[in-house]
Image: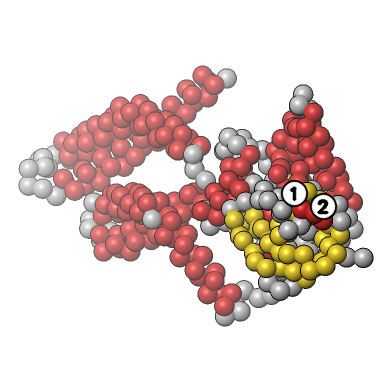
Amino acid sequence: MQEGMGRLVNIIIRTLLSILGAIAGYQLAQYLSGSPWWPKSTLMLDLSMWGLVIVFSAFIGYLLAPLFIRGIARIGQIFERSLQSFTWQDLFVAILGLIVGLIVANLLAMPLSAIPNLGFYLAILLNIILGYIGLIIFLRRKDEIVSMWSSFEVFRDRFHLKGKRTREEDVHDNIKILDTSALIDGRILDIAKVGFIEGTLCIPAFVLLELQAIADSTDPLRRAKGRRGMEVVEDLQKLPDVKVEILEQTLKELKVDTVDEGLIELAKKLRAKIITTDYNLNKIASIQGLSVLNVNDLANALKPVLIPGETLEVDVIKEGKEPNQGVAYLTDGTMLVVEDGEKYIGKRVEVVITSLLQTSAGRMIFGRVKREAN
């Protein structure tokens, strides 16, 4: 079947090139017939020369057909390989450059078309050359063109030329992608319950696969973490005021190898924020200009602000590192070192804050016993 189709295409192309060659031969003979050396002694000789030029040109077209076919096939293979690595953005810019190049070529070809016999061929050559040049220039300047288009959209928005944004567009700008660490941590569920999450919470399918792999681990601790993450996903989906979507994109479709890379690519594609507790993912995403919501940062920001001189009641539960020190903990887990508090271990006391110390490991508070609480 393919062999028969190939023969048919070969015959059609040979015929077309032969016809084009004959037309070119006719125009050439018409041009040469006006020269002094063209034989005009008899009508028969004149017609013979016309026929000879036309047939010879048609024969040249016939002989060039195989080269033309191989050239077209070669160009098709190159285009096929190129298109495999092309994005839709690349294709759009290439077509735009081709159109601009052809417009310029046709404007320049207008005066050339008046040249007898050669004008038509010069116009075709000019279209090919300038079309190719436009395509290449636009592809090489793709980033600048896309940036210019984005600037134009901002300009339209600023002057209200775009009209009112739809509800879907507003939601699109409020997408938040949950990573594995945030789901295992579980505090995102409490945050969502009290209504501090706006927009859509998106969970990529590859994050669910990672959770499943952790839940199937032979390590009991990892298995418990994985199951906890799956339970958080289920509980989030049950919340009436929270919209949760599962994104079906795979790592292969995103052309990445790791889950963190997939989260970053998705966030870029959807203009979304990433919710995480992973320090490394937080840093990498921030370096690439993405917005990251770290649950740990939120927890630190919500810790109560204490100042020296303030008093509070705590339970002294153990001795400190230094002699006579006692240690208590606030409700958020912050350590409170109580001066001369060793003798109050196991008792509730009223403590006066004397100083605060911020370390890389967290915040430490120092105080002294004011009196024993009732």
Visible residue check, residue 364: yes
Visible residue check, residue 305: no
How far apart in space, not on screen, are marks 2 and 1 (Cα)? 7 Å
Q: Residue at x 66, y 58 (%)?
A: 364
Query: In the image shown, does 184 or 33 lie closer to the viewer?
Result: 184
Q: Residue at x 57, y 38 (%)?
A: 256
Q: Which mark is on residue 296?
A: none
Mark 1 Cα shell of 10 Å, populated few (<14), some (14-19), many (≥20): many
Q: Residue at x 26, y 64 (%)?
A: 111
Q: Residue at x 76, y 43 (%)?
A: 184
Q: Is residue 96 shown left or right of residue 309? A: left
The C terminus lies in which quarter of the figure?
bottom right
Q: Earlier in the sequence, mark 2 or mark 1?
A: 1
x then y, percent, for residue 207: 71, 40
Is 33 rendered above or below residue 216?
below
Residues at circles 2 and 1 in contact by the CB criterion of under 8 Å: yes
Which residue matches tag 2?
345
Is 46 rendered above or below residue 7?
below
Amino acid type at mark 2 = Ile
Q: Which mark is on residue 319?
A: 1
Amino acid type at mark 1 = Glu
